[in-house]
C-alpha cells in the first residue's frame, strides 16, 4: 500500500488505541449524548463527552415568561418525573412570594412527588436491566407505571409532562377515583416490586455485570458535585428531604438508604430501596390525608388570591375573582425584588432553582441546577480502565436524562 | 363541576368475535388468488414495518410506554425495533431536534435504504413545539421529508399508534414505481439529497 | 473466564447496602448549632479579608456577599479549608448579566454548601464585559469544570486556567453569547411566522405597517404600533 495515495490523519499510524464513537443516536432511549471513547483492545483509555444535542434554551425562554408559563418548561427538564420539577418550581415561587401552604396540600404534594420518584427509579432500574440484556423486567414494571400515569391524569389531565399544581396548592381537589387508584397502587405494587427484585438482585449474571463497574469514592463524588442516589451509593447520606425539609417532610418517618462502593450494583440497590421508602411515604401521607374531615377535607390550595387562579365559577360571578384572574393571567402581580435559591430532592439529585427577580412580571434570571449535567462530568473517571461493556452499564445506571442535561 | 362526556358514549356493538382484515381486490378461483403485485407487496410491507426509534426527549418516554404491554406496538408488526438505519424502514423521530442534532438526523435518513418512511412524533419534531428559540430546529421537515405528523406534547400512545396506522395505509397503497419517479426525485432534490 | 463463587461474606463486603436512619432534622435543631450562624461567617470573612468582601445581604436567609474578581480563588480556598467554615460542596455556578452596571456587567455566582452543619452561602464576583476574565475554580472543585464551560457558552466569561474552555451546549460555530440581554430569543432568520394576530407586522397589519407581500422576516417586525400608510 503506497503512502502517497492514502491520506492518513496526523499521528494515526503510531496510534495504538481505537477511536469509537458512541454517538448521539444510540440504542435504548437514554437520550442524546455523545461519547468518543479511546479503546485499547477492550479497555477504555479515555473518553470525551459532547452534550448539547437537545439544548432548548430553557433559561433564556424563562426570562420571557410569567411564572405560570414557566411550569411547563420545568416539566421537560427531567421528563421521567415531571411532577417533582413542577413542585420544586412552585416551592421556589412560594419561597420568593412568602406563601404558606396548609398541611393537607403538603401531604397531597408528598403523595405526588413520591409517586414521581417511584416512576423515575423504575425507568432507571429497568433500563439497567435492558442494557444488560434482560428485557422482561422492563415490561413487568411498565404496567405499573401506566397506573401512576392514570393517577396523574385524574388530577391534572396529562400523563407525562404534567404541569401539575399551582402556586399555593393544586388546581382541583383529588377526587374519589384518584384515591381509589392510589389505593390500588399501594395494594398491588409491592408484589410486583418483589418480583422485579427476584429477577435481578441475586441474579448471578446481573451481579457479575454490575459489581465493580464504575465505582467512585465518597470524596471524589462530593468533589464532582454528585447528589441523589449516585452520591448515596458512594456512602454519603445527603438527602435534601432530611437536611432542609420542605412540604412537611419532617412529619414523616422514612430511612435514607446508603451504599458502600458507589458502583452500579450499589446504585441499583439504593434505587430499589428508595422505591420501598417512597411507597411507605405514600402510604403514610395517604393515611394522614384521610384523617382530615369535613371542611378541612376540601382544602386543596392556600388562600392567596394574588397568586392562585380563582375557580371559574367565581370568575363568572364575583368581581374580585374576575380582577384577580385578569391580573394573574396578564402577569401584573406584585413580585418582590430579590434573589432566592431553593432546591428539592429530585429523582437524580438536588434540583435547584436560582431565581433573580427585579420586580417585573418575568424572572430577570432563572438558573436550573441540574444534577445530571453536573455528575456526567465524572463519567471519564468512572470508566477509566474498564471494559467496553461497562461503559454502557455505567451510563445507564447513572440515570442520565438528556433533557435535564442540556436544558 | 365537570363537563359531561359527549363523544364515544354509545358503545358500538361487536358484530362478531373475530374481525377480518380486508382482502385486496383480485380474481379468485379454486386454490389461487390473483391480484396486482403492488397490492401484495403493500400488504406484506405494511404488516411488518421495522421502526427506528430516534427518541430524543419526552416523546421517547411515551414511545417506551407504547412499546410496553399496555399499548402494544408489536401487534402492528413492529416487534423488532432496530437501531441501525441500514435495517429499518420507518424513522420515528420523537422529541425536540436541536440545530446541533439536525445533521445527525439527516445522516441517519441518508443511511436508510429505499423504501423508507418518516414519522414526526410530537409537536417539537413537527414544528418546533413550544420551543421557538435560536437553538431548536423548527420541525424536522427542514432537513428530511416527512410522511406523517403526529401532534401532541407528548402525544398519547393511542395517537402514536394512530400515526403508525396511517403509515401503514401509506405503505399499503404506495405504487412500486414511486421511488424511481420524477416527483420523488424532485422532492429529494429540494432537500439537497441526491 | 473463570466464574467465581460468591460466598455470603464476599457479598456482604462488596455490595451490601447499609440502611442509615437519618434523623429528620427540622430547621433550628441540633444541626444549625450556635457556632455557624450567618453573623459568625460574616465576622470570620471580614477578619480575614477586611473590606475587600462587601455587599453582605441575607435574602431569604442565605448569606450573600461579593469580592473583587482577583480574589475569588482566595475566598473559595478560605471557605473550603477553614476548619470551622467547611464549605466543601459546590452546589452551583452560574452567570448573570446586568447591562446597566457599567464596569461590572457580568456576575459569576457561586453557591456553596456546608454539608455537615447544613449552611448555604452565596458568593458573587463581578467582571467588566470588555475584559471578562475570572480565575477558574476547577482546581478546587471538579464540579466546576462543565459549569464554567456553560457560563462561558452563555455569557462569554473567560475562565483563566480552565483545562478545556469551549462551548458545551450551543453549536460550536456560534459566534455570539446568547444569554446576554441584548440578544433575542427567537431565531431571526425565519420567514414563515405570521404574527398578525399578535399585532406584530404580518399580512394584515392591524395597527402596524401594512405590507403588500405576505409576511415580514423576523427582524423587520416591530412591536410598536405605527400608522397604516
Image: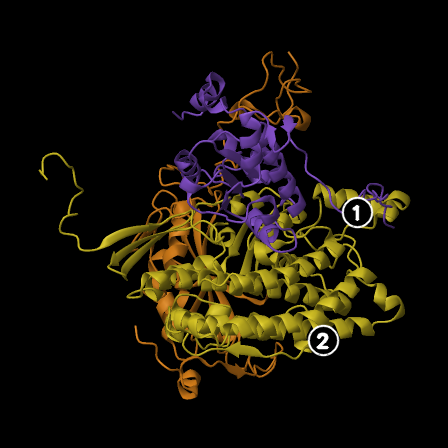
Disc 2 and disc 1 on one polypeptide chain: yes
Q: How packed is label 2: few (under 14 Cα within 10 Å), some, or many (20 or more)?
A: some
Left or right: residue A379 versus residue A282 is left
Q: Which numbered disc flags the more N-terminal residue, 2 or 1?
A: 2
Can you give x and y, in whole percent of width and height, for residue A12 in the image?
17, 47
Can you give x and y, in whole percent of width and height, for residue C22 in the image?
56, 81
Image quadrant occupied by the C terminus of chain B = top left
Left or right: residue B109 versus residue C204 is left
Can you give x and y, in whole percent of width and height, for residue A367 in the image?
52, 53
Q: Colour of chain A?
A: yellow
Q: Is residue C128 above or below residue C117?
A: above
Task: Name the secondary structure under disc 2.
Answer: helix
| Distance in Å between CA atoms under marks 2 and 1 | 36 Å
Residue at numbered disc 2: A284
Q: Closer to the camera, A19 or A296?
A: A19
Mark number displayed over residue A342: none
Query: Which chain letter matches label 1?
Result: A
Residue at numbered disc 1: A324
Specify the chain shown as orange.
C
Extreme residue in the bottom direction: C9
- Residue A319 sits in which quadrant? top right
State the residue at coordinates (61%, 66%): A118
Q: Is residue A206 above or below residue A58?
A: below
Can you give x and y, in whole percent of width and height, for residue C78 in the image?
37, 71
- Residue A120 sits in which quadrant? bottom right
Specify the chain shown as purple.
B
Amino acid at each position: 500500500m503506497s503512502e502517497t495515495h492514502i491520506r492518513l490523519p496526523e499521528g494515526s499510524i503510531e496510534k495504538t488505541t481505537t477511536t469509537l464513537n458512541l454517538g448521539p443516536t444510540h440504542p435504548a432511549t437514554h437520550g442524546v449524548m455523545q461519547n468518543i471513547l479511546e479503546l485499547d483492545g477492550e479497555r477504555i483509555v479515555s473518553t470525551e463527552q459532547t452534550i448539547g444535542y437537545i439544548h432548548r434554551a430553557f433559561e433564556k425562554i424563562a426570562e420571557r415568561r410569567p411564572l405560570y408559563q414557566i411550569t411547563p418548561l420545568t416539566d421537560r427538564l427531567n421528563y421521567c418525573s415531571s411532577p417533582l420539577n413542577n413542585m420544586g418550581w412552585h416551592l421556589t415561587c412560594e419561597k420568593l412570594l412568602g406563601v404558606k401552604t396548609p398541611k393537607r396540600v403538603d401531604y397531597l404534594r408528598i403523595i405526588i412527588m413520591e409517586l414521581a420518584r417511584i416512576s423515575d427509579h423504575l425507568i432507571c432500574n429497568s433500563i439497567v436491566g435492558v442494557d444488560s440484556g434482560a428485557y422482561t423486567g422492563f415490561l413487568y414494571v411498565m404496567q405499573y407505571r401506566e397506573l401512576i400515569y392514570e393517577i396523574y391524569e385524574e388530577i391534572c389531565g396529562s400523563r407525562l409532562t404534567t404541569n401539575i399544581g399551582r402556586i399555593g396548592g393544586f388546581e382541583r381537589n383529588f377526587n374519589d377515583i384518584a384515591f381509589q387508584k392510589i389505593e390500588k397502587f399501594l395494594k398491588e405494587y409491592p408484589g410486583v416490586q418483589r418480583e422485579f427484585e427476584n429477577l435481578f438482585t441475586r441474579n448471578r449474571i446481573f451481579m457479575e455485570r454490575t459489581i465493580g463497574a464504575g465505582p467512585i469514592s465518597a470524596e471524589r463524588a462530593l468533589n464532582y458535585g454528585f447528589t441523589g442516589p449516585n452520591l448515596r451509593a458512594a456512602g454519603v447520606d445527603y438527602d435534601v428531604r432530611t437536611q432542609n425539609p420542605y412540604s412537611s417532610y419532617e412529619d414523616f418517618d422514612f430511612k435514607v438508604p446508603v451504599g458502600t462502593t458507589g458502583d452500579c450494583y450499589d446504585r441499583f440497590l439504593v434505587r430499589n430501596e428508595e422505591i420501598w421508602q417512597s411507597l411507605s411515604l405514600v402510604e403514610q401521607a395517604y393515611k394522614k390525608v384521610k384523617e382530615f374531615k369535613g371542611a378541612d377535607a376540601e382544602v386543596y390550595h392556600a388562600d392567596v388570591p394574588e397568586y392562585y387562579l380563582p375557580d371559574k365559577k367565581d370568575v363568572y360571578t364575583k368581581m374580585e375573582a374576575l380582577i384577580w384572574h385578569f391580573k394573574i393571567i396578564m402577569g401584573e402581580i406584585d413580585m418582590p425584588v430579590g434573589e432566592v435559591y431553593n432546591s428539592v430532592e429530585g429523582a437524580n439529585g438536588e434540583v435547584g432553582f436560582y431565581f433573580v427577580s427585579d420586580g417585573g412580571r418575568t424572572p430577570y434570571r432563572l438558573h436550573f441546577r441540574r444534577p445530571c449535567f453536573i455528575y456526567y462530568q465524572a463519567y471519564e473517571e468512572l470508566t477509566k480502565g474498564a471494559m467496553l461493556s461497562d461503559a454502557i452499564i455505567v451510563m445507564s445506571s447513572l440515570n442520565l436524562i438528556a433533557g435535564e442535561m442540556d436544558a | 363541576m365537570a363537563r359531561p362526556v359527549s363523544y364515544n358514549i354509545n358503545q358500538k356493538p361487536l358484530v362478531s368475535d373475530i374481525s377480518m382484515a380486508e382482502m385486496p381486490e383480485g380474481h379468485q378461483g379454486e386454490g389461487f388468488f390473483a391480484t396486482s403485485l403492488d397490492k401484495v407487496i403493500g400488504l406484506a410491507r405494511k404488516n411488518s414495518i421495522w421502526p427506528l426509534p430516534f427518541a430524543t426527549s419526552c416523546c421517547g418516554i411515551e414511545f417506551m410506554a407504547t412499546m410496553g404491554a399496555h399499548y402494544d406496538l408489536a401487534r402492528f408488526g413492529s416487534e423488532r425495533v432496530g437501531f441501525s438505519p441500514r435495517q429499518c424502514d420507518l424513522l420515528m423521530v420523537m422529541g425536540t431536534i436541536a440545530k446541533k442534532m439536525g445533521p445527525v438526523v439527516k445522516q441517519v435518513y441518508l443511511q436508510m435504504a429505499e423504501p423508507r418512511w418518516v414519522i414526526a412524533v410530537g409537536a417539537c419534531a413537527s414544528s418546533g413545539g413550544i420551543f421557538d428559540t435560536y437553538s431548536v430546529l423548527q420541525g424536522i421537515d427542514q432537513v428530511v421529508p416527512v410522511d406523517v405528523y403526529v401532534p401532541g406534547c407528548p402525544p398519547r400512545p393511542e395517537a402514536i399508534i394512530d400515526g403508525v396506522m396511517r403509515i401503514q395505509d401509506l405503505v399499503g397503497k404506495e405504487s412500486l414505481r414511486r421511488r424511481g419517479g420524477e416527483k420523488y426525485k424532485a422532492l429529494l432534490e429540494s432537500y439537497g439529497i441526491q | 473466564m473463570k466464574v467465581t463463587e460468591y460466598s455470603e461474606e464476599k457479598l456482604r463486603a462488596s455490595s451490601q447496602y447499609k440502611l442509615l436512619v437519618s434523623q429528620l432534622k427540622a430547621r433550628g435543631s441540633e444541626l444549625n448549632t450556635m457556632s455557624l450562624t450567618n453573623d459568625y461567617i460574616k465576622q470570620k470573612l471580614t477578619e480575614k479579608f477586611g473590606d475587600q468582601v462587601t455587599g453582605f445581604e441575607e435574602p431569604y436567609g442565605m448569606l450573600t456577599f461579593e469580592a473583587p474578581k482577583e480574589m475569588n480563588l482566595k475566598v473559595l480556598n478560605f471557605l473550603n479549608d477553614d476548619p470551622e467554615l467547611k464549605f466543601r460542596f459546590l452546589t452551583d455556578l452560574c452567570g448573570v448579566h446586568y447591562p446597566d452596571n457599567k464596569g461590572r456587567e457580568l456576575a459569576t455566582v457561586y453557591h456553596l454548601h456546608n454539608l455537615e452543619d447544613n449552611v448555604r452561602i452565596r458568593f458573587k464576583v463581578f467582571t467588566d464585559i470588555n475584559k471578562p476574565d475570572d480565575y477558574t475554580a476547577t482546581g478546587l472543585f471538579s464540579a466546576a469544570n462543565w459549569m464554567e464551560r456553560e457560563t462561558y457558552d452563555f455569557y462569554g466569561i473567560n475562565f483563566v486556567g480552565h483545562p478545556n474552555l469551549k462551548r458545551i451546549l450551543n453549536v460550536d460555530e456560534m459566534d455570539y453569547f446568547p444569554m446576554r440581554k441584548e440578544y433575542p430569543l427567537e431565531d431571526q432568520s425565519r420567514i414563515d411566522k405570521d404574527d398578525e394576530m399578535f399585532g406584530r407586522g404580518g399580512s394584515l397589519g392591524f395597527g402596524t405597517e401594512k405590507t403588500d407581500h405576505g409576511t415580514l422576516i423576523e427582524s423587520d417586525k416591530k412591536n410598536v404600533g405605527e400608522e397604516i400608510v
